[in-house]
Image (tube, rainbow, N blue to C red):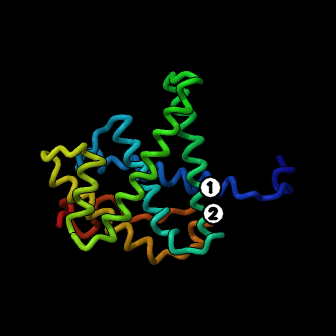
Amino acid sequence: MILRFFRRNDGRETIQRLYGAIVAQSRDTVFYTEYGVPDTIAGRFEMILLHAFLLFHRLKGESEERRELGQRVFDAFCVDMDANLREMGVGDLTVPKKMKKVAEAFYGRVAAYDGALDAAEPGALHEAVLRNVYDSDEAFTAQAAGLAAFIRRAVAALAGVPFDTFAAGEFPIPPARDPHSKELVTP
């Protein structure tokens, strides 16, 4: 036990804490009860992707060396997804195909949300959320608008967080519900 204090810190514990914080935030019940995200494997996967996106979006303005933190979190995400697939009974021969789809989904969401945040069209993020999280079901228009508002709040809050906070394994994201309102925030 005492020998662990003498080993070189390679950052694995920090990455696991950071990825764990992303997963914990994605499990906030507000997303499933008030925002109407389906409480299914697919819905939980979407919330993990969304929260990982928030970290990646924040890190994209950092130096290449600092963006490596994001790559290491992505690697932890892939290891976790691989383990989850195997735990759900996906066979060894099928896991690589499923992992390819996981990676495509991740990069697709990053591109969609980044593009929507950068778009001149204010409804672009709402549309991206409706399409990805709610499978374009118009019945969830208000929930998609609320989730888009949460994303904007989170992006703004994370913009002011120093890199060292993330490097310490912390992910200080705002609460899923707007603290100034008892209702969902919709634009």
Nearer the observer, 140 or 172:
140
Give SS at disc 1: helix
Mark 2 closeness class: few <14, some 14–19, many ≥20 residues within 10 Å: few
Q: Position of residue 18 (x, y in %)?
A: 56, 57
As drawn, 130 above or below 70: above
Nearer the observer, 162 or 120:
120
**Residue beneath disc 1:** 72
Q: Quadrant of residue 148?
A: bottom left
**Residue beneath disc 2:** 68
Nearer the observer, 7 or 41:
41
Q: Position of residue 91 (x, y in %)?
A: 55, 21
Residue sitting at x 57%, y 73%: 163
Q: Are marks 2 and 1 in contact (CB under 8 Å)?
A: yes
Q: Which quadrant does the C terminus fall into?
A: bottom left
Q: Position of residue 12 (x, y in %)?
A: 69, 53
Q: Position of residue 139 (x, y in %)?
A: 13, 45
Identify the mark at residue 61; answer none if there is no mark: none
Residue sitting at x 17%, y 48%: 140
